[in-house]
């Protein structure tokens, strides 16, 4: 109490303080004293309002407390009443046990009465079981399945009800149960006979539904009845623990297995041939299978749909059955091993025919197979493709080996190569044969998939590159053997012309192949390999052309050695012989294709120019006086023009705007220059035009002049080369013929 009083006193003091502060704030100015009455009235109204709110709140709380007390009183009274009732119930329960023992006889009588009722209801079946069994068996044999099944259901119901009543007895008699089952044992035999008949009808579904759809409907109705009976038996087993004999029958599951087996037999039955009997056995099997599935699914879609209950989803069910059976049979075929084009036939059929408009996407079917998966797993498809590519690779190797052997035989045959009827270009059938085979394989791969086409294309490129390596090795062996004894192969030049033409034909056919079969998303590796193919055959063409020219230049070796010698000064024979000999060879070179002819002519010019310049730089002659130098250079310039005119006459269509013979004339002009300053200018001009001229080249050139000492030549050349290095580069021939001229002997301190 003291604490409460102190609390109230403290609150009152705080209220007085707040009131004093409030009044002080109101009366801060003299003019506010006139409004004291108004302030009093306002504060009085506010005080009355607050007091009213407090009274209302207190009244509301008091009412709530009063109601709570009333409810507590009522609850107490209810609890007392319930307690009295529970005591009374306990007293009543204590007498129930005595009542149960007194009613035991009534309970037993009720059980017997229930059994009598069931027995009475089934008396007609119990006493007529043998007759019912015989009649049901007769109906089954006559095909009256609905009547037979109704009779069977009555017999099973009687048996099951009697067994259930025995099951409910507290003291079950095993002997009674055995006796009852033995009495009804023929019923189980009838069930098996009915199942066998249903199996037989369903196994012929696709044939029967075309003629008599009702024959299919009857077993389906029976199966639906049995499914309901199964559900009832399972439910009763959950409730009472009793399961009727032979339940659940699961005839719907049985029906699906029968249909699956029927489909599997139809799929297997289309394989009428073996590989030993017919090489096209697989193609025939796949086509017969396509026709079978197409026709069967038409029947399923149009005739089976109305016969089967909707929840069977029979069209989709049959599609899955055919899909599964076909998949398994194809796996068995693959496991047995495939050969040759059988890989192609199978892959094309699986990836295109099966899912395409010829079968599943046929206008009359239009079946989506995306939800049932592929016929074969991606791993098996990849394995088939790899085996197909390995088989293709082996075929390529065999064909190319045989083709190359044929080429070698042609080289040693002593017969002129073939030329086309319209053109005179020598060629062999090898490039065409190889690329025809490639084209056939790629056409087949294209019918399967773009991915396989890309892989096959890369494989073809690799094989053509490999053939190029074998071709090169054979050419080098052919060349070595020929040069050992040039009389062994009378038409060596002609065969080399053929080889040069073949190399270009390989590149042209490869480009055509790329245009036809190149897949846009081919990997970078494919692009690199294709470029390698072109480069390899281009290089092989160049090697073959070099061998071709080597043959002709072997006959001119002595004449090249006579160039720029004292003997040469007084004789026109070396160059004239060179021209006559080359003209003879060039008559054969007309059998080169235009592109190759142009290349060989260009190479021949460069070789002759290189040999001529090399002869000039070998200092086989010493020009001691200016007159000797003038005579020599005049002859050099005349022969350079003669060689240039010779090539213009031999190959007028070959454009040659940078003739290598112009270089010979430029060198002759340097030699015939009399003034030392002009000589320096000519050397500067020469080095600017041909920057790949070496210091050794220039020293050797000046060494032909008898009026320039070795030291002076070195000084001039060193100065010119240094000046050239310090000057800005101007338009020049960075890769002129001088890059190929290497003098092997040591002259003026030159070292190789």
Image (cartoon, rainbow, N blue to C red):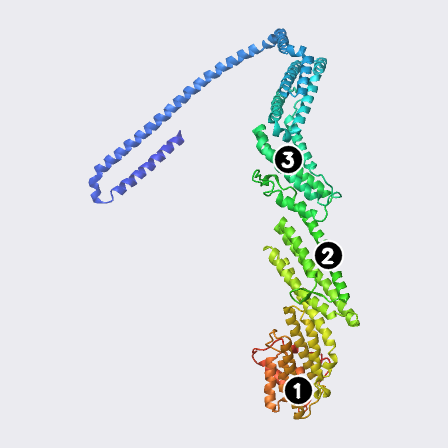
Decide if residue 229 is in sight here: yes
The label on residue 73 is none
The earlier-in-sequence mark between 2 and 3 is 3
Q: Residues within 10 Å of mark 1 (few under 14, many from 20)?
A: some
Q: Residues within 10 Å of mark 3 (few under 14, many from 20)?
A: many
Labelled pair 1, 3 in contact (Cβ < 8 Å): no
Labelled pair 2, 3 in contact (Cβ < 8 Å): no
Q: What residue is shown with label 3?
A: 321
Relative image position of residue 678 (x, y in whole percent): 59, 89
The residue located at (39%, 24%) in the rendering is 64
Label 3 secondary element: helix
Q: How many marks do you count on the picture?
A: 3
The earlier-in-sequence mark between 1 and 3 is 3
Q: What residue is shown with label 1?
A: 635
Relative image position of residue 316 (x, y in whole percent): 59, 35
Q: Is residue 528 above or below residue 650?
A: above
Relative image position of residue 41 (x, y in whole percent): 23, 35
Q: Quadrant of the N terminus?
A: top left
In which image quadrant can residue 134 be found?
top right
Q: Quadrant of the C terminus?
A: bottom right
In which image quadrant can residue 11 be found?
top left
Relative image position of residue 558 (x, y in whole percent): 75, 81
Residues 378 and 1: in front is: 378
Q: What residue is shown with label 2?
A: 399
Label 1 secondary element: helix
Q: Is residue 108 above or below residue 572?
A: above
Q: CA distance from mark 2 to mark 3?
A: 44 Å
Residues 560 and 593: in front is: 593
Q: CA distance from mark 1 to mark 3?
A: 96 Å
Q: CA distance from mark 1 to mark 2?
A: 57 Å
Judged from this view, the residue extending furthest toward the front is 421
């Amino acid at each position: 109490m003291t604490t409460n009083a102190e609390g109230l006193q403290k609150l009152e003091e705080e209220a007085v303080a707040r009131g004093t502060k409030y009044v002080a704030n109101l009366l801060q100015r003299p003019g506010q004293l006139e409004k004291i009455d108004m302030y009093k009235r306002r504060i009085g109204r506010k005080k009355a309002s607050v007091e009213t709110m407090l009274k209302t709140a207190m009244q509301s709380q008091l009412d709530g407390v009063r109601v709570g007390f009333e409810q507590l009183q009522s609850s107490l009274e209810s609890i007392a009443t319930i307690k009295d009732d529970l005591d009374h119930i306990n007293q009543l329960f204590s007498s129930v046990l005595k009542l149960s023992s007194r009613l035991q006889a009534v309970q037993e009588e009720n059980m017997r009465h229930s059994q009598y009722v069931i027995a009475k209801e089934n008396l007609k079946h119990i006493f007529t079981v043998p007759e019912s069994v015989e009649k049901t068996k007769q109906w089954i044999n006559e095909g009256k399945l609905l009547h037979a099944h109704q009779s069977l259901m009555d017999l099973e119901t009687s048996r099951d009800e009697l067994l259930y009543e025995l099951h409910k007895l507290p003291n079950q008699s095993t002997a009674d149960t055995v006796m009852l089952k033995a009495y009804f044992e023929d019923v189980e035999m009838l069930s098996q006979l009915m199942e066998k008949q249903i199996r037989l009808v369903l196994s012929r579904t696709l044939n029967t539904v075309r003629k008599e759809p009702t024959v299919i409907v009857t077993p389906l109705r029976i199966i639906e009845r049995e499914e309901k009976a199964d559900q009832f038996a399972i439910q009763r087993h959950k409730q009472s623990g009793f399961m009727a004999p032979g339940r659940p029958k699961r005839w719907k599951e049985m029906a699906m297995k029968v249909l699956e087996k029927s489909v599997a037999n139809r799929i297997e039955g289309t394989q009428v041939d073996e590989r030993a009997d017919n090489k096209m056995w697989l193609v025939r099997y796949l086509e017969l299978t396509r026709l079978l599935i197409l026709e069967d699914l038409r029947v399923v879609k149009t005739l089976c749909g109305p016969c089967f209950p909707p929840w069977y989803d029979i069209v989709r069910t049959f599609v899955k059955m055919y899909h599964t059976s076909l998949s398994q049979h194809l796996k068995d075929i693959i496991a047995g091993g495939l050969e040759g084009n059988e890989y192609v036939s199978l892959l094309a059929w699986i990836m295109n025919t099966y899912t395409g408009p010829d079968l599943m996407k046929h206008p009359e079917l239009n079946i989506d197979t995306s939800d049932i998966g592929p016929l074969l797993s991606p791993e098996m498809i990849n394995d088939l493709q790899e085996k197909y590519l390995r088989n293709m690779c082996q075929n390529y190797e065999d064909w190319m080996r045989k083709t190359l052997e044929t080429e070698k035989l042609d080289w040693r045959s002593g017969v002129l190569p073939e030329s086309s009827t319209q053109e005179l270009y020598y060629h062999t059938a090898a490039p065409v044969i190889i690329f025809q085979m490639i084209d056939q394989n790629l056409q087949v791969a294209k019918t399967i998939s773009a991915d396989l086409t890309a892989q096959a294309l890369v494989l073809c490129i690799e094989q053509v590159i490999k053939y190029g390596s074998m071709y090169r090795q054979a050419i080098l062996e052919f060349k070595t053997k020929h040069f050992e004894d040039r009389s062994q192969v009378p038409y060596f030049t002609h065969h080399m012309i053929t080889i040069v033409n073949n190399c270009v034909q390989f590149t042209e056919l490869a480009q055509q192949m790329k245009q036809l079969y190149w897949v846009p998303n081919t990997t970078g590796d494919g692009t690199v390999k294709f470029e390698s193919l072109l480069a390899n055959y281009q290089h092989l063409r160049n090697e073959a052309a070099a061998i071709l020219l080597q043959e002709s230049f072997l006959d001119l070796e002595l004449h090249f050695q006579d160039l720029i010698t004292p003997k040469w000064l007084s004789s026109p024979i070396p160059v004239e012989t060179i021209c006559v000999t080359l003209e003879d060879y060039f008559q054969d070179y007309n059998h080169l294709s235009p592109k190759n002819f142009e290349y060989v002519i260009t190479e021949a010019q460069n070789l002759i120019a290189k040999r001529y310049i090399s002869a000039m730089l070998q200092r086989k002659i010493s020009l001691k006086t200016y007159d000797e130098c003038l005579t020599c250079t005049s002859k050099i310039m005349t022969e350079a023009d003669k060689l240039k005119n010779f090539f213009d006459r031999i190959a007028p269509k070959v454009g040659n705007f940078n003739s290598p013979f112009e270089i010979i004339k430029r060198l002759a002009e340097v030699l015939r220059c009399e003034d030392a300053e002009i000589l320096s200018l000519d050397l500067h001009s020469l080095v600017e035009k041909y920057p790949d001229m070496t210091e050794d080249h220039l020293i050797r050139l000046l060494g032909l002049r008898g009026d320039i000492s070795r030291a002076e030549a070195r000084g001039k050349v060193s100065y010119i080369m240094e000046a050239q290095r310090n000057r800005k580069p101007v338009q020049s021939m960075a890769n002129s013929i001088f890059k190929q001229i290497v003098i092997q002997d040591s002259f003026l301190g030159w070292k190789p």
